[in-house]
Amino acid sequence: ADDVTLQLKWVTQAQFAGYYVALDKGFYDEEDLNVTIKPGGPDIAPESVISGGGADVITTWMAAGLAARERGVPLINIAQPFKQGGLQLTCLKESGVESPADFPGRTLGVWFFGNEYPFYAWMAKLGIPTEGGDDGVTVLKQGFNVDPLLQKQADCISVMTYNEYGQVLDAGISADDLVTFNYLDEGVGMLEDGLYVLEESLQDPAFFDKMVRFVRASMKGWKYAEENPDEAAQIVIDNDESGAQTLEHQQYMMGEVAKLTAGSNGALDPADYEQTVATLLSAISPDNPAITTEPEGAYTLDVTDAALQ
Amino acid sequence: MTTEPVIKADGLDLTFQTNDGPVHALKGVDLEINKGEFVSFIGPSGCGKTTFLRVIAALEHPTGGTITVNGMSPDEARRNRAYGYVFQAAGLYPWRSIARNIKLPLEIMGYPRAEMEKRVEEVLRLVDLEGFGKKFPWQLSGGMQQRASIARALAFDADLLLMDEPFGALDEIVRDHLNEQLLALWARTEKTIGFVTHSIPEAVYLSTKIVVMSPRPGRITDVIDSTLPRERPLEIRDTPEFLAIAHRVREGLRAGHAYDE
Amino acid sequence: MTTEPVIKADGLDLTFQTNDGPVHALKGVDLEINKGEFVSFIGPSGCGKTTFLRVIAALEHPTGGTITVNGMSPDEARRNRAYGYVFQAAGLYPWRSIARNIKLPLEIMGYPRAEMEKRVEEVLRLVDLEGFGKKFPWQLSGGMQQRASIARALAFDADLLLMDEPFGALDEIVRDHLNEQLLALWARTEKTIGFVTHSIPEAVYLSTKIVVMSPRPGRITDVIDSTLPRERPLEIRDTPEFLAIAHRVREGLRAGHAYDE
Amino acid sequence: MKSVLPILTVVVAIVLIWYAAAIPMNAQWARDQAARADTTLTTSELIADTLSQDRPRLPAPHQVVVELWNSTGDMVLAGRGLSNRSLILHAWYTLSATLLGFAIGTAAGILLAVGIVYNRAMDMAVMPWAIASQTIPILAIAPMIIVVLNSVGVQGLVPKAIISAYLSFFPVVVGMVKGLRSPNASQLDLLQTYNASRNNSFWKLRLPSSMPYFFTALKIGIAAALVGAIVGELPTGAVRGLGARMLSGSYYGQTIQIWSALFAAALLAAALVGIVGLIERLMLRRMGMEQ
Amino acid sequence: MTLVILSLAFWLAAYLFNNWLAKSRWSGSRAVRLAVPAIFGVTVIVVWEGLVRGLNVPMVILPAPSAIATRFAASLDLLWIDFVQTVVKGALTGYLIGTGAAFVTAVLIDRSLFLKRGLLPVGNFIAALPIVGTAPILVMWFGFDWQSKAAVVVAMVFFPMLVNTVQGLADTGKMQRDLMATWSASYWQTLFKLRLPAAMPAVFNGLKIATTLALIGAIVAEFFGSPIKGMGFRISTAVGTLGLDMVWAEITVAALAGSAFYGAVAMVERAVTFWHPSQRN
Ligand SMILES: Nc1ncnc2c1ncn2[C@@H]1O[C@H](COP(=O)(O)OP(=O)(O)OP(=O)(O)O)[C@@H](O)[C@H]1O
Ligand SMILES: Nc1ncnc2c1ncn2[C@@H]1O[C@H](COP(=O)(O)OP(=O)(O)OP(=O)(O)O)[C@@H](O)[C@H]1O
Ligand SMILES: Cc1ncc(C[n+]2csc(CCO)c2C)c(N)n1
Ligand SMILES: [Mg+2]
Ligand SMILES: [Mg+2]
């Protein structure tokens, strides 16, 4: 069997259910692949792991992938299981935020570590400075949890539909008490979890073939997960070595993630790509030069074309 | 002389409780020391010399018998700052200059500033250390440090001076010299002095009274009143009278000594 | 006597370079020590006694003059393990039992195991410490530790024994006792001994030759050959002959002494 | 044993203060929730609520103890002592990295110390940089170490152990240098008079006399190694170990889980230091250096 | 490859030169004492540069020193802002509060053997709580700005300082204490004239240990939530966006600040404990 190492962007959770299902259900075996899935975390940049040779393929957000490409890691998108994005900004209603017009003077929690590009793009679009003050917003580097909202340290925080939003609800705050802005709806949506490899490895036909089989099996896993969310959640739990996740939460997450992957057969829609690039380019600022020039050859449809035949 | 004794001990006992059982550091010690006397304590290691001095200074408390200092309890005497104490090692505080070391007891006793300066000058002269006030202890030789520590004990008005092997760490020549100076100082100030030593010639040379002690339990085995005159040049040590006293002390010591301990 | 000198120093100079300029620790030292002699070095602090012993032991190297030990350079002599050295403090290694402390030089010199055991037994007996081999140093009194350190220097075959104030830290009675034992040992083994001390009686009591030194620069001011017999009970110290020698030593010392250092 | 009563007293005092602090710290959330539900709380209801929240700002002591028990002893009783939900398993993951890192760090520390003591150039060159190296925040370079090692094919336990070694080597160097230099001049001179070789002076004098310093350093070092192992778990995917528990506790807002992992780590540290102390006592007693 | 060989050759040459310097006649002089570690440092940098270039290590794995220096020079303003936020506001405040509180606590509990016996072991236990666990909690309690960083620093430095100070206060000779008794000095007189001065070497030991802890604590705490400035913020963000040159520029600042902080405390120590044998060589 051929070895493939997949580096995830985040810890084992239903966000990556498709891959775990493919592994568990033997879809990879069927394609004669021996897949190792490496969980990520807040200190792991998959882009540097792959450039150091620690992985064959990674999942990451397109903005981070393109940024890495511009910094000399020639990443190329080979598949896009997430059609929709799940990134949102959620505010407590009692804080008085009702629309983006209310943002000035507020404190907003943002995820950094390569997750901040959509936020800056949005602020650029709204024309709101991010240096604080009365007509700007004060930005916090939010930890990867929802405490700042619960403890009222921020008016709004970043959440993913499939994870933190559920945690806020779980904590006992009802959806009615929340005001939520979805980046897609605000017109600054960007492609989220995609599969990326190094451009030069793809020149190798053997590697190309391996990726074709990998994407095929992974997508099979995703579709299985969408149809059997509870089983998928259980598979994720079984693969979580930290033992910290609850089945309940993973079931919720699987349900939400399925909504994002539902529209994708794995192939990247070039229109989505163009929109992401356009949004990024519209928001170039000295603080946040995600990308400064239009990327070229940052994706290929060859792999998915071959895989989906 | 109007002889009300400065120190009066009656059947003094002191037992330390240790892990290995009780240690009888002092047992039935009777002693009177009169004003102006120079009393040496001599005896093998562990016979309770230090302990006796510490009882006088109220640094230890007897477990039996009575003791008075100037007619008071040792604790009261200490509160009245009745004595100066000189330890074997100079025990100067290394972060203070010599002058400030000497000033330390004066600060604690609340002397006025001008008075302090005056006294420091005075005692530095007394121990031949003029001009060394600004030096730090480690910049002085062992003998000079020891003199500074004596100066420190002299700076305040205590009529009683307790000295625990003050010259133990010094070489013989420096020791001779300091012995001479100490005698001169004693003659000049008329203090009462209690002096612990290991050296027989030193004890004989300095004292008006020599107390020989013996260990296990610590007790007094002999009290020798010196027949030497008050005026004592160093050469007195080669006289038969001196040697006779020294001989008696040595005999007393040897009786109480165990070699293989 | 077949007198090829064990130690022969000719115009020996040793200058230390320090931050405060050069220190002349030894200046123009001439001395011969013959086989079987017991030579004491006496002199005020800083006169170079230790330095001279260290030069013999090749622990320091002279900056001028020549010195031979057994006809060789000190370094060669050291490589031949020509001498044992006893320091002022016992300097036993606290993590080794007494027996293993004594074994230390034997291990380093590569003696066979059985031989080591034999010698340890032997020297322990020689210094009256049979049965203490398994104890650790801190379980022994100061005097016993010092005897153990002498045993350590005796354990290997060195004809020359260098001792730097070995009894300086002990009380007078214990010291007297060890002095007697040392003399007995010397008589039995016929070693050559170089012995540094601060005590005049000790020097006179022990030596066949007394070297009086004086500081700044360190030099020899007097060499006194003892007229005392080889057989010396402790009482010899009260004889006029003894006192006469002591007197001469004291005079020599006083001449070279600066009080205010 | 004399310390048992004082320690108990202090612990009891801390627990009381802790309870007292938990109430006001968690009260805000209780009130907010009540307000959202349009009810008001009586004082006793409020206190009861603050001591039993799911995601408290400060969990009550009993909540932490219960969680600790549930994730250790209770699991053992249920026969699942080594499941991935058991803190015992995670403590073991952390412990294995700690021990390996400690071994590497100690070995490196000793070697460096020997170099410093025996080579003047190393002495002068290395020490200032060793101090500077400790001012670098390890958490910042941990991800880079992991990636770099990954790129040369080293992964798994070793990268974590190396981070842990990085933290533990420094106290060992400092302690060992002090210890190897602790023999005084006359102890060294004594060996000179025997014409002892460098080897002899190392094995027979410097090494034995450094032992007390060595063990003091080891106690600091092993505690540091544990911190290093926990830090090293974060950029390796935080999948296993006590550090992973703390971090995932933080992702999912499980404060109680964070606290129990914290206490497990501190207990582990105390145990490790205790074991080193025990070895020290045995060793020093055998060497006759302890009265 | 030639670069690799060249840098290794440089290393060898520098090593031999240092060895020669250290053994040479001037080895005690100030110049040599500064030169030897400096040469060592330069060697590390040269070898690093040579290896990175020679082996074509990608920038996102390990940037070359020259690239770091370039970034450093270009980002001085940013580095300064981060320095003020993390070192001045976070680390220094926490350091002063933590060591100060520990010092006062030590003096207070020093009167009670009971408290010392109880508090020190418990304190050691609490000090063993790993910062990665406590930092998120303290961020939750004290907010995102420097206050929570200072709190982390306080938590980190308090117990090492306490232990050292308590030890120092006990660090008087029996004779020194007896002397005070013979003068029948009061508790406070003994404290100020004997025990505090005698404690200074140990106190400074604690203060020195606390410097590195303070800096590390302040930086690491920023990983768990911060405003958008600060060295920890910049490092974690730059790692995520592959700005490794920026990461190393910040690390350089950390090392410089840490060494300077340590050096400053050591200098004060020299002035205050001039009398201690360890300061007199
Ligand atoms: N604090 C103490 N606790 C227990 N035993 C003590 C204490 N102080 C002294 N001793 C014991 O009391 C005895 C007398 O001791 P002391 O110090 O008075 O002797 P000394 O005559 O001064 O001896 P040295 O000449 O060695 O100074 C000794 O056996 C000693 O071990
Ligand atoms: N390593 C050294 N460096 C510089 N000066 C030294 C050194 N060793 C000794 N001296 C100086 O050389 C002189 C002679 O010292 P030495 O130790 O030989 O004297 P000593 O006669 O043994 O004195 P003591 O009776 O105090 O032991 C002294 O002035 C001393 O300060
Ligand atoms: C490919 C990918 N990119 C970014 C994130 C970032 N992100 C999204 S949610 C979350 C917190 C935990 O759910 C974080 C860090 C991700 N998860 N997956
Ligand atoms: Mg005594
Ligand atoms: Mg000497």
Image (tube, coloured by chain):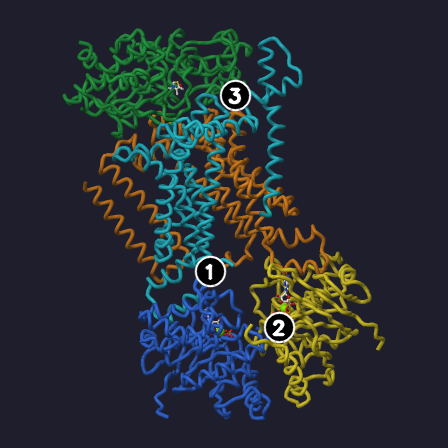
Chain colours: A green, B yellow, C blue, D cyan, E orange
Q: Amino acid at mark 3?
A: Arg
Real-space CA distance between mark 3 and mark 2, rounded to the nearest whole angstrom: 72 Å
For the question of whether residue A72 can be seen, the reply is: yes
Q: How many marks?
A: 3
**Residue E158 percent coordinates (x, y):** 55, 39
Q: Residues within 10 Å of mark 2 (few under 14, many from 20)?
A: many
- Label 2: element kind: loop
Give the camera-side residue of B187 and A218: A218
Mark 2 lies on residue: B167
**Near-viewer residue (D158 or E234):** D158
CB-based contact (under 8 Å), mark 3 and mark 2 = no
> Where's the N terminus of chain B, which quadrant?
bottom right
Query: What is the chain identity of the residue bearing mark 1?
Result: D
Q: Is residue A183 left or right of residue E280?
A: left
Does C118 sit left or right of C222 as displayed? Answer: left
- Ligand 1 within 8 Å of disc 1? The answer is no
Q: Nearer the viewer, mark 1 or mark 3?
A: 1
Residues packed near mark 1 inside 10 Å, few (<14), some (14 to 19) or many (20 plus)? some
Of marks 1 and 3, which one's residue comes earlier in the chain?
A: 3
- Residue C109 lies, with reference to residue A35, above or below; the image says below
**Which chain contains the residue that carries disc 3?**
D
Give the amino acid type for the residue marked by disc 1 in the picture. Answer: Gly
**Quick one: A179 or E116, which is closer to the camera?**
E116
Q: Nearer the viewer, residue D11 or A78?
A: D11
For the residues labelled 1 and 2, say whether their Cβ atoms are less than 8 Å apart: no
Question: Which residue in the protein does label 1 denote?
Answer: D288
Q: Which residue is mark 3?
A: D55
Q: Chain of mark 2?
A: B
Residue type marked 2: Phe
| Residue E173 horizontal/vertical position (percent) | 60, 58
